[in-house]
Image (spheres, grey):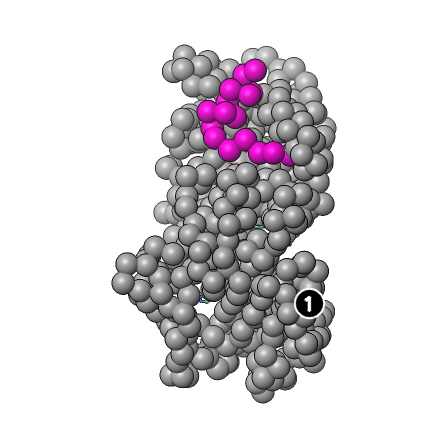
């Protein structure tokens, strides 16, 4: 090969990152910061806007958490970085095209699907996945057309993770509390007319196995309009949970303390109630042409072969009337044409971030994964930093060992082909134009921003 070697200032190592959420941005920062080799990163994003779930997942009433985007903004300003928004990889460009244009492709596309309960009535009108509700209230352009009938007085949220608490809070916040946030305008309006007074959360296991974390549980107490209700009988630990408490982590202990405090409180008589229930699974959602009730079965905990605790039905059932069910039992990933997918785990097939050939079990040269699509849908924003580091370390290791294939064409040829096909890209300046516009609209209303929620509007603003 003639000319300068890859990885030098004259010919940087060219990396495509797909997905501009935390994992994609942390990976970009790590690669651009490598120094030797010199790296250029093109970051492809299917939306005209960056930040993944930091924009489309984190709850509107958690603005401080969203400020992590400042770290990503610094990465975007580094030499060698390009943001290529409004490009859906797998549709607008193929995996093969990326592989032939870059030394490596690193997927950080998240896991946007919802896990299913697998019970009767799950698809009745009035039964929604939290995934949809979250994307709707956060103004994700693919979800703005959804409709949520908020006329029932009782909502049932299935699951007791942090997303379930986000959903419960969003249903419980007052209009004044919400109006100070960047919640999408269509959701602000719909939630203003909500008749929901009681939000029942169902945990299939006990209070010592709750998936939510302590600050998120505690902040329920600060809601202007809602009391938090916990039945003290629900906190009586079974023998397994009690035995495990000695070695339990701080989160479990603090959660239990907070739950005991809630259970001991006299409700202040606020107009809304968040009711936390444990050892309760929905076994059917009933209704003729829309949700009318959830059938709930009481569980007990049994030990599994690996030492964990599993919920087992006891046969004791009750019927809870409701017109609104939010299923918040976790996210799941989907396949992308050409990239090996592990359907059981809902992630790309990988070993520590190296995507694997399913036939041979060995790494596919130049293909990597980070974030939720690598390890599954759990962990907070910061978890993705370490996760991305593991992947970028492998990538740089592979480069040093001569294991990255030399691309046969250039990124600019790829971008020219996209432009020739009439595809409209949003570059970082385009996003900055959107950002400035949204913030200016927000400032006039005393809000952090007013989100543009349609692709057409976002693209027009990026152009303008
Ligand atoms: C509702 C919710 C609330 C949360 N709140 C918090 C919180 O308050 N605090 C906290 O620390 N953590 C929170 N988390 C967790 C945190 O958001 C995740 O850990 C993190 O976002 C995962 O990062 P990621 O980059 O793997 O995926 P994502 O953030 O999902 O980013 C993936 C990106 O890839 C893009 N993409 C997908 N497919 C393609 C494609 N084919 N081509 C191009 N681009 C594509 C997506 O549009 C998206 O921008 C929350 C999670 C959820 C679901
Ligand atoms: N503020 C924040 O920091 C914040 C906010 C939102 C999200 N996040 C993070 O994002 C990640 C994803 O959150 P998540 O809430 O979607 O997932 P999660 O933490 O995995 O919680 C999923 C919940 O659904 C339950 N569940 C699963 N399958 C079920 C079934 N078939 N029937 C009944 N219940 C079922 C789980 O119970 P089991 O435990 O019994 O499986 C658990 O309570 C988490 O790591 C979370 O901490 C963080």
Q: Position of residue 426 (x, y in %)?
A: 53, 22
Specify the quadrant that holds the C terminus: top right
Residue that carries the numbered disc 1 in the rendered image: 251
Residue at 46% x, 19% y: name it.
Answer: 424
- Using the rendered view, name the quadrant where residue 3 is placed: top right
Specify the quadrant that holds the N terminus: top right
Mark 1, secondary structure of its residue: helix
Q: Which residues are magenta?
A: 449-464
Q: Is residue 434 in the magenta section? A: no
Q: Position of residue 267 (x, y in %)?
A: 65, 73
Q: Is residue 454 in the magenta section? A: yes
Q: Position of residue 372 (x, y in %)?
A: 53, 48
The image shows residue 28, relative to residue 79, as above or below, that is: below
Residue at 46% x, 24% y: name it.
Answer: 456
Q: Position of residue 256 (x, y in %)?
A: 67, 74
Is residue 452 shown left or right of residue 90?
Answer: right
């Amino acid at each position: 090969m003639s000319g300068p070697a890859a990885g030098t200032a004259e010919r940087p190592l060219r990396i495509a990152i797909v997905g501009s959420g935390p994992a994609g941005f942390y990976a970009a920062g790590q690669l651009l910061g490598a120094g030797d080799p010199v790296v250029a990163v093109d970051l492809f994003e299917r939306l005209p806007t960056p930040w993944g779930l930091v924009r489309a997942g984190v709850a509107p009433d958690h603005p401080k958490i969203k400020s992590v985007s400042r770290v990503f903004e610094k990465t975007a300003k580094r030499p060698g970085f390009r943001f290529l928004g409004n490009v859906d990889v797998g549709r607008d460009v193929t995996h093969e095209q990326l592989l032939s244009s870059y030394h490596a492709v690193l997927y950080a596309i998240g896991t946007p699907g919802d896990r299913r309960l697998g019970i009767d009535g799950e698809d009745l009108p009035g039964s929604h996945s939290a995934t949809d509700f979250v994307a709707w209230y956060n103004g994700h352009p693919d979800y703005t057309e959804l409709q949520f009938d908020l006329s029932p007085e009782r909502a049932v949220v299935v699951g007791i993770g942090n997303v379930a608490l986000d959903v419960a809070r969003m249903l419980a916040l007052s209009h004044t509390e919400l109006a100070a946030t960047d919640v999408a305008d269509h959701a602000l309006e719909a939630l203003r007319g909500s008749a929901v007074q009681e939000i029942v959360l169902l945990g299939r296991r006990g209070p010592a196995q709750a998936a939510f974390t302590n600050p998120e549980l505690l902040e329920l107490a600060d809601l202007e309009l809602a009391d938090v209700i916990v039945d003290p009988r629900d906190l009586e630990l079974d023998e397994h949970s009690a035995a495990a408490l000695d070695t339990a982590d701080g989160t479990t202990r603090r959660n239990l303390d907070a739950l005991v405090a809630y259970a001991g409180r006299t409700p202040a008589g606020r107009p809304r109630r968040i009711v936390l229930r444990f050892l309760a699974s929905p076994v059917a959602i009933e209704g003729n042409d829309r949700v009318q009730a959830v059938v709930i079965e009481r569980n007990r905990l049994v030990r599994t072969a690996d030492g964990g605790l599993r919920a087992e039905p006891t046969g004791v059932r009750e019927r809870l009337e409701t017109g609104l069910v939010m299923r918040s039992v976790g996210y799941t990933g989907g396949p992308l044409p050409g990239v090996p997918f592990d359907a059981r785990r809902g992630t790309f097939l990988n070993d520590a971030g190296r995507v694997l050939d399913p036939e041979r079990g060995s790494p596919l040269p130049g293909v990597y994964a980070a974030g939720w699509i690598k390890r599954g849908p759990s962990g907070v924003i910061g978890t993705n930093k370490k996760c991305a580091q593991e992947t970028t370390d492998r990538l740089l290791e592979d480069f040093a060992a001569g294991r990255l294939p030399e691309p046969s064409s250039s990124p600019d040829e790829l971008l020219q082909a996209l432009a020739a096909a009439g595809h409209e890209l949003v570059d970082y300046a385009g996003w900055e134009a959107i950002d400035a516009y949204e913030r200016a609209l927000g400032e006039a209303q005393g809000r952090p921003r007013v989100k543009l929620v349609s692709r057409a509007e976002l693209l027009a603003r990026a152009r303008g």
